Amino acid sequence: MDPLQNKRIIVGITGSIAAYKAGELVRELKRGGAEVKVVMTEAAQEFVSPLTFQVLSGNPVYTNLFGPEGRWDPEHISLAQWGELVLVAPATADIISKLSLGLAGDLLTALTLASQATIIVCPAMNSGMWENPILQSNSKRLMELGFHFVGPGYGELASGKIGKGRFAQIEEIIGKIKEVLYPKRNLLGKKVVVTAGRTEEDLDPVRVLTNRSSGRMGYSLAQVANWRGGEVTLISGPSILPPPFGVNLQRVRTTQEMREKVKDTFREGDILVMAAAVADFKPQSLHQKKLSRGELSLKLEPTPDILKEMGEIKGDKILVGFALETGNSLDRAKRKLEEKNLDLIVLNDPTQEGAGFEVESNVVTLIWRDGRTEPLPKLPKLEVAERIWDRIAEILK
Ligand code: CTP
């Protein structure tokens, strides 16, 4: 499930030119299923109208510490109790310094001071202001007190100059929020390697042997491992999917390239999940020139079995493989688990209804070393990834 689902998030907007970008941020939060209430400072309203955020958030926008007449409960307290997360984005030099001193002269500072929730600050300002030692020291104080910071980034600023002070990318902010909100942090301190997608084997200068794997299952596994606190390297064959946030993405193309990368990273790693659909065969010889229509027979040879090689050196590390079987053969999957010395194997049949390469869902059966099997219902790939990490967490215990 998306970590944003049903979360109550307060977005505090302050007077920076990046205030207009907060509109996109609110949209993304809503898209993920969060409920959003926006608080704007007076300066923020000089840049964008509260109406914009009222429409985008689907809630009234809060601007005044003393609220409308006739309300008995102080707004800053009820909002502080409502929010599970306070996001100050964009955050000016002014708000950062006020927060670091515990000032509470307006609604946003007062509610942030009263809140017990996690607070994320996304600075956006001129680089001179950001680099000023006063602001650096105030930001450092907030970080020491447990405030999370995202950005600022380096690049072109509103003044036209290049420097540090740019509002962070929306994906980066959303990624941080998901990481902070996610309840199961059971991979903290673990180095996780996930492979995904297909590999390609060259036949001639223009043609390859490959399969239809999209990488979705592996990318979901990497994303969930990152939410759970793992330090994740995703080794991916060609894929059009966007890199999951917070994950070290290493792109490869051939089986040999994947093998080298897996060997290097698993040496230092704790857990390897091989979700990649590695090409099983490659042409016996690479043709230097494009093959012509006449030459129709191909001689193939097997590629190295990466997972099996890792099984030989695994020691007490955790190794999880996939078994891609048309016909859902439990016995074949069990044999692969044994032959490759795995802790868990995930059996899937891409020809089954609700499973397959291009679809968002999957139907899998989990098989343990001791022979236990657990068929899972048809689930979104992210949810399958959650279940797999739940089971790996059990093995880790
Ligand atoms: N695998 C691998 N290296 C290969 C082939 C497969 O590391 N050259 C890994 C896959 O990533 C997967 C597991 O081994 O985790 C099983 O892959 P699969 O294609 O189902 O089985 P194979 O061992 O290749 O056997 P077969 O194709 O004969 O079914």
Image: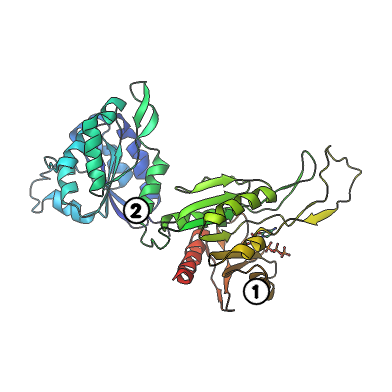
Going from N to C along the chain, the mark reached first, 2 or 1, is: 2
Q: Which residue is mark 2?
A: 180
What element does badge 1 sit on? helix
Report the front residue among 367 and 349: 367
At a point 62% along the width and 61% down the height, the residue shown is 310
Q: Which residue is mark 1?
A: 334
> Residue 233, how many percent across, how many down?
52, 51
- Categorize mark 2 by other alpha carbons within 10 Å: few (<14), some (14-19), many (20+): some
> Residue 40, how many percent across, how many down?
22, 39
At a point 34% along the width and 42% down the height, the residue shown is 150
Quadrant for ligand 1 reads bottom right
Extreme residue in the top direction: 160
Q: Is mark 1 within 8 Å of ligand 1?
A: no
Q: Is residue 92 left or right of residue 313?
A: left
Three-letter code for the amino acid on which mark 1 is drawn: Lys
Q: Quadrant of the N terminus?
A: bottom left
Extreme residue in the right direction: 294
Marks 2/1 in contact by CB < 8 Å: the verdict is: no
Q: Is residue 41 left or right of residue 221?
A: left
Answer yes or no: is residue 38 visible: no
Vertical arrangement, residue 362 with respect to residue 397, above or below? above
> Residue 208, how many percent across, how many down?
75, 46
The type of colouring in the image is rainbow
In three-dimensional space, the C-alpha distance between marks 2 and 1, rounded to whole angstroms, equals 37 Å
At a point 56% along the width and 70% down the height, the residue shown is 343
Q: Is residue 183 left or right of residue 350?
A: left
Q: Which mark is residue 64?
A: none
- Categorize mark 1 by other alpha carbons within 10 Å: few (<14), some (14-19), many (20+): many
At a point 56% along the width and 46% down the height, the residue shown is 250
